[in-house]
Image: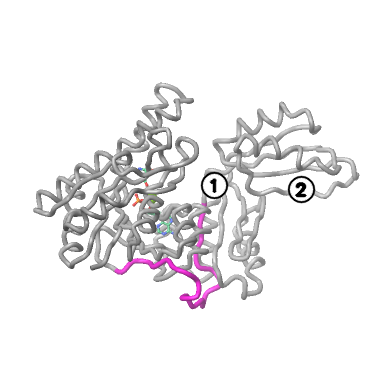
């Protein structure tokens, strides 16, 4: 008997018809002799609607109460899916985060799963039941409801697979696997049969929301193989596992993009030791994540310009902190929040010379200006004007033979 974790995303449980379809998938898996734990998201769009409601009350809605509100979407789908299974005469039961409990650590809206109590649920599985668990949430040591970051049901599924020692963790979604880029934006995108944790982690962190990045990180850390597959077709999905199992024929595996970046430039900053630390220390204390940093060479040895990128939502807070910072001198701040980050990712890049130059040439052929660059062993990211995003993705997809 094999224990399986099956995670169903928002579109997969977006209507009662779809929930009944998901119940049939579970019924079939169970009839094959498997023990099933299903993790569900809220219905597609529900969590966004709840965020909107909170904003109608306050832009600075209390975070503890925001978690109480946001976690409710998954309660609805848990109840509906259990009910749909029971209607099919499958023994099923839902557990809410506090009933299990799923223990978390860290701040509200961005908590982290620490542990999950397994005895009750294991006993239920042993007696032939299907356990339905809400994704995206837990309970803190103070007994407060927490959520673990948007897209967090993936992370719940991986944590459950680890703590319950499941044999597989299958991520059911609205596409039939991980593609070379978002298939809903670039129709010629190709499905990837297997991909390493490292590459998937880069793709997710750089904007491919098909898997949440912290879920991939946990899977990589504990070597939990994942499979991304479709709720709506029987086609084989994408396997995500450790690198040794993968044969690289291509230098670039995928192209990712994110549109929630912004670029800030400090003009005329003093060019002396300690200045960069003085700029970035207060930002880091305020939990602002600085992504790329570029410092220009100073022509007069006295002043220089420093450019960096942050998430768009952090721009006004960043500017406030810079303006209040008495440890730095500069002439002015320029911002551009209409930028996007486009990245190529591939474990094969390490062994292929010329990838960097080919990317830059391709973008210049399209008349696209590069505003900032950052690299690692397996990824190359550039910041460009947001309007050029689609053109850049298409071009890179083509020149790296991904169409
Ligand atoms: P779920 O609600 O099932 O968690 P998500 O909306 O979070 O689903 O993720 C699936 C979506 O991810 C797809 O509909 C697709 O538009 C998007 N996506 C972005 N990049 C990729 C990629 N490289 N491969 C597949 N899907 C991608
Ligand atoms: N419902 C949550 C969200 O929309 C979690 C998830 O779907 O993974 O972010
Ligand atoms: Mg998702």
Tally the marks.
2
Residue pointed to by mark 2: 295
Q: Nearer the viewer, residue 394 or 210?
A: 210
The image position of residue 242, as x and y in percent, is 47, 69
The residue positioned 60% from the left and 38% from the top of the image is 287
Q: Residue 116 in magenta?
A: no
Residue pointed to by mark 1: 387
Span shown in magenta? 236-257
Q: Nearer the viewer, residue 100 or 72?
A: 100
Image check: 33 left or right of 239? left
The image position of residue 374, as x and y in percent, is 65, 56
Q: Nearer the viewer, residue 269 or 130?
A: 130
The residue positioned 57% from the left and 41% from the top of the image is 311
Ligand 2 rendered quadrant: top left
Q: Where 118 sits versus 329, above or below?
A: below
The reply to whether dot 2 and dot 1 touch (C-beta < 8 Å) is no
Give the quarter of the image for residue 306: top right
Q: Where 360 sits versus 142, above or below?
A: below
């Amino acid at each position: 008997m094999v224990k399986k974790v099956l995670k169903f995303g928002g579109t997969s449980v977006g209507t009662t018809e779809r929930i009944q379809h998901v119940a049939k998938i579970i019924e079939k898996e169970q009839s094959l002799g498997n023990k099933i734990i299903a993790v569900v998201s809220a219905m597609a769009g529900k969590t966004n609607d709840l965020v909107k409601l909170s904003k109608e009350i306050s832009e600075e809605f209390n975070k503890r109460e925001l978690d109480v509100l946001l976690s409710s979407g998954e309660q609805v789908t848990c109840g509906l899916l259990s009910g749909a299974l029971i209607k099919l005469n499958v023994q099923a039961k839902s557990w809410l985060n506090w009933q299990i409990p799923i223990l978390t650590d860290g701040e509200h809206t961005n908590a982290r799963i620490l542990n999950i109590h397994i005895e009750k649920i294991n006993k239920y599985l042993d007696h032939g039941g299907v356990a339905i668990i809400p994704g995206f949430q837990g309970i803190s040591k103070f007994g407060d409801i927490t959520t673990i970051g948007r897209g967090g049901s993936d992370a719940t599924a991986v944590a459950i697979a680890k703590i319950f020692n499941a044999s597989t963790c299958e991520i059911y979604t609205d596409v039939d696997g991980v593609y070379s880029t978002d298939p809903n934006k670039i129709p010629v995108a190709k499905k990837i049969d297997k991909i390493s944790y490292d590459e998937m982690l880069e793709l997710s962190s750089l904007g491919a929301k098909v898997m949440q990045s912290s879920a991939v990180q946990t899977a990589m850390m504990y070597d939990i193989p994942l499979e991304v597959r479709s709720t709506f077709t029987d086609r084989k999905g994408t396997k995500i596992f450790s690198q040794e199992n993968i044969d690289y024929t291509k230098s670039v595996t995928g192209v990712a993009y994110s549109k929630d970046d912004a670029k800030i430039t400090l003009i005329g900053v003093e060019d002396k030791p300690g200045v960069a630390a003085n700029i970035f220390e207060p930002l880091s204390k305020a939990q602002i994540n600085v992504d790329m940093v570029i410092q220009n060479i100073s022509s007069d040895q006295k002043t220089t310009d420093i450019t960096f990128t942050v998430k768009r939502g952090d721009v006004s807070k960043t500017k406030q902190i810079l303006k209040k910072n008495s440890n730095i001198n500069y002439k002015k701040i320029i911002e551009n929040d209409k930028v996007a980050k486009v990245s190529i990712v591939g474990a094969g890049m390490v062994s292929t010379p010329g990838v960097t130059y080919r990317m830059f040439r391709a973008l210049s052929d399209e008349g696209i200006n590069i505003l900032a660059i950052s690299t690692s062993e397996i990824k190359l990211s550039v910041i460009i004007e947001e309007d050029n995003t689609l053109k850049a993705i298409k071009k890179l997809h083509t020149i790296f033979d991904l169409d």
